Amino acid sequence: MFQSNNYQHGLTVLITTYNAANLIEKTLEHLQTMRTIPNLPWEVLVVDNNSKDDTLSLVNKVWKERTELRIAYEKRQGTGFAQFTGMQQARYSYIGIVDQDNWVDEDWMEKGVTYLDQNPRAGLVCGKGTPVFEKAEPPWFKVYQQNFAVGPQHDSNGVIQNQNHLLYSAGSIFRKAAFDELVGYGFNPLMRSRSGHSLLSGDDSELEILLRMIGWEIHYMDDLNFQHYMPAHRLTRRYFIKLRRGLGATAVYLDLYRSYPKSRFGDIKSASNDWRSLLIRSFARVIRDPIALIASLLPNYEANFRVAKLWAEEGQFFERLACGSSLQETRNQLFTWLDSLPMRK
């Protein structure tokens, strides 16, 4: 396994933030009441992603711990970019991912750090979020709660054996050596999570796929817990449609990673996977369920599986349409880089 001597054993709590003046105070308060590990150094690293409000002044006002709080900046818009910058600048061997609306449990550090100490092949360990609602929980929420980075992620603890099972990384703890190994191979994130007005996601899924490729394990702990605040605007029909379409758009890029093993080592003909063929197939999936198309225009159908699936397929089609032939070039460049990685089992 990759080793680095550029950092000492400890924990960097990474918070990427954008216009979080109404959220950041409680997030930091939970970190300040968290139980720490004696003699384990730790820090909080806040990466500001072009906030226009007084997020940073609140950060400096609220933080009262003797533990160092550092502020970094990422001008490229998107939490994927901000997180990548933060992980590069982390000083310690473990990196805890705490979103600006995550409230970690008191034992979060103790459990996460101890778990990684005991499992040296784990590239990261993911936990479980519990929603805290600003207003009443929508009737459809539990069905799609993992889209919002809450709820159980696996039926058992330990290493995730299914290579296609991807976890949300909110509340997780990464091993910096695993991330640095990827960077050493020339990794540059393809995903631009929540960039601009888009709800693209998948920066965490991209890292999970790549860590597995180079031999690291992904683990799950159902008692590595945090609360995830759900403001009212995230519980609206409009936001849910946007979220589902963003997940569909994200799948366009994750599908490149998924197709790589079969394209390189299987019997799939590249001609059947050119950008035009994929675009046509994506459009066919959008129009194959006319009842869902009609229902998607009517209120109160968010909980319908066919309607939610349609919105994701719409997002995938429009992302493929926007990319056009450039997606083929992206695929070629990605596959060339993946060919250079030392694949391990």
Image: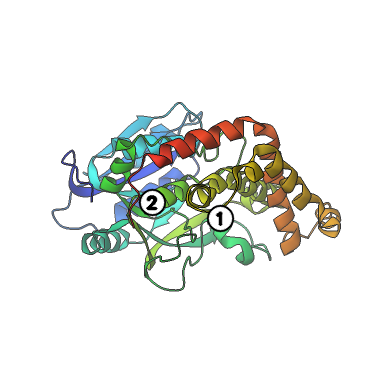
Quarter of the image for the C terminus: give it: bottom left
The amino acid at mark 1 is Phe
Q: Is residue 63 visible?
A: no
Q: Badge 1, how many Cα within 10 Å: few under 14, some, many 20+?
A: some
Disc 1 marks which residue? 148
Q: Residue drawn 65% across and 54% down?
A: 235
Judge by depth and name the residue closer to the eye, 268 or 20. 268
Residue 251 locus on image (x, y percent): 59, 48
As drawn, is 103 to the left or to the right of 326? left
Q: Residues within 10 Å of mark 2 (few under 14, many from 20)?
A: some
Depth check: give the residue in front, 260 or 104: 260
Residue closest to the eye, 75 or 318 = 318
Which residue, as the protein is rendered here, is positioned at the far left? 39
- Residue 8: quarter of image: top left
User: In this picture, is 166 found above or below 186?
Assistant: below
Question: Mark number for residue 213?
Answer: 2
SS assignment at label 1: helix
For image coordinates 81% across by 55% down, the residue present is 288
Give how far across and how far down residue 255 sits, in percent: 57, 48
Marks counted in the figure total 2
Q: On the rendered structure, is 63 left or right of 320?
A: left
The amino acid beneath tag 2 is Met
Q: Are marks 1 and 2 in contact (CB under 8 Å)?
A: no
Residue 321 on image: x %, y %: 70, 36
Q: Position of residue 166 (x, y in %)?
A: 48, 58
Q: How far separated are the C-alphas under marks 1 and 2?
A: 26 Å
Q: Quadrant of residue 118?
A: bottom left
Q: Earlier in the sequence, mark 1 or mark 2?
A: 1
Name the residue rendered at 41%, 55% in the picture: 103
